[in-house]
Amino acid sequence: MTTLAPTPATAPRGAVAPGPRGVPLLGNLPQWKSDTAQFLLRAQRDHGEVARLRLGPYTVHLVTAPDAVGRVLKENSGNYTRGVLYEQFRIVMGDGLLTTDGDYWKAHRRAVQPVFLRKAVTAIGPNVVRATREMLDDWEVRARRGEPVDLVTETLRLTLVTLSRSLFGYDIRPAAPVMKDIVDNVIEVMFKHGSVGEMLPSWLPTRRNRLIARDRRIFTRLVTEIRDRHAATGEGPLMELMEAATDPVTGARWTDDEIRDEMLTIYLAGHETTAVALLWTLVSLARHPSVGEELDEELARVLGGAEPAAEDVERLPYTSRVVDESLRMYPPIWIYPRDAVADDELGGFHIPGGSSVLLSPLVSHRNPRYWDNPEAFDPHRFDPERVRERPRMTYFPFGAGARMCIGNFMALLELRMITAMIHQRFRLKLVPGDFLRYGDTSISLRPLTKVLALPEPREAGARA
């Protein structure tokens, strides 16, 4: 294992955390902007599990010590608010679960929680199978023509269609290209790049602000269509919950704006993250044939060529570990910023009130102190005995605590079922290209370019 230095365990209590040297005024901002992920990985390697960074006028601590991560997300989460970055999100997404805090957030989370509970999400199984089968049938046609598929586009469309049918009872396929444009624009503007346009007021008609306003208008029209269809058919369990939701204090029904903002949050956050996780799982399988062979054995033994149902997932432990390992190496949301309200101590280091904290699953999941050979793809890391050896909070692809991703059970079910279905019918041969780069200054770990793959059909006996 690689040695990290210095470690929080040896630091004097209340000390100022170490960190990389910067330049006058800008501090570490040039390193941050040049290659954010690699900069943070180096900061952990060279300065330990609590590293002090200076980004222009801001003091930021990168925190990867498991106990300290747990303190931020769970034990002392009240001291760590969503912070300045989430104001960027609010500009685009309004007041949804991702951007709000306090009583408002608690009431909204409580209202929609029932549809995301572990037992409830199994109801999406038929929609997962139907949408995946539609995609794979199209791949059969394209495979006969020798045409590659773009895994970015395909996974985004698949998870969007599944989510929309399952939660809102709405077939969004005709609007899928429009939604992809909205998602692309949202991801582009949600994470600050240090441009002048980001510093200007939202009411100024800059290109960026016009783009945000246009996308919100388009989505508002789509919301009207979805709500009208629900009123006519009664389909869509989440739509039903939202239409019936009330303010716990006033008893008033949710406003149109409240419903729209929650729908936008769930559509964007729900399908984008699952698609990115699925994409990296497929890429990893394509790059590691021995993992695919072990997956073959389990799928043949358990499913016998049949399509998986939601109830089958518990009988596919290796499939689950493949997904877990993909989420370790490529967590879709790879960085969680928080602002410290008051002074605190993390890993023995002083965290001043008013400063920011960065938690990064990408960095924590590659910490050689807890993960042997962290750059290798090894699903057996998640064998039960090896999981028990690791401290809690060394692995948190969905966050943790009260703000843990509300859709984590749904995402895991989708990822396991879809991975099984794709692997039963196809081998993916990646088309060479520079696609294993991702947007360091984006909140999402989506690759920067198309990811092209040739789907090679399996023999007929491998599927039902």
Image: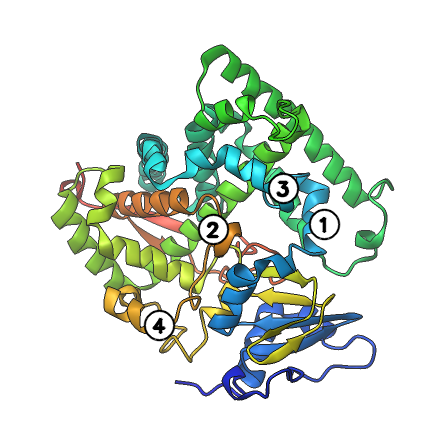
Q: What is the crowding at mark 4: few (fewer than 14 residues within 10 Å), some, or many (at least 20)?
A: some
Residue at 53 percent across and 39 percent down: it is: 109
Q: Give the image quarter of residue 62.
A: bottom right
How many residues crowd around disc 3 within 10 Å: few (fewer than 14), some, or many (20 or more)?
few
* Disc 2 secondary structure class: helix
Q: Which residue is mark 4?
A: 390
Residue 430 is drawn in which quadrant? bottom left
Give the number of the mark in front: 1 or 2: 1
Q: Is residue 343 above or below residue 284?
A: below
Q: Is residue 323 visible?
A: yes
Q: Earlier in the sequence, mark 4 or mark 3?
A: 3
Q: Amino acid under label 3?
A: Asp
* Mark 1 or 2, nearer chain start: 1
Q: Where residue 87 is drawn, which disc sits there?
A: 1
Q: Secondary structure at mark 4?
A: loop
- Residue located beneath label 2 in the image: 276
Q: Residue furthest front?
A: 249
Say whether disc 3 or disc 1 marks the residue closer to the N-terminus: 1
Report, in whole angstroms, how far the alpha carbon at label 4 lies from the one at label 1.
35 Å
Badge nearest the viewer, 3 or 2: 3
Q: CA distance from mark 3 to mark 2?
A: 31 Å
Q: Which residue is mark 3?
A: 103
- CA distance separating discs 4 and 3: 35 Å
Structural distance between the alpha carbons of marks 2 and 4: 26 Å
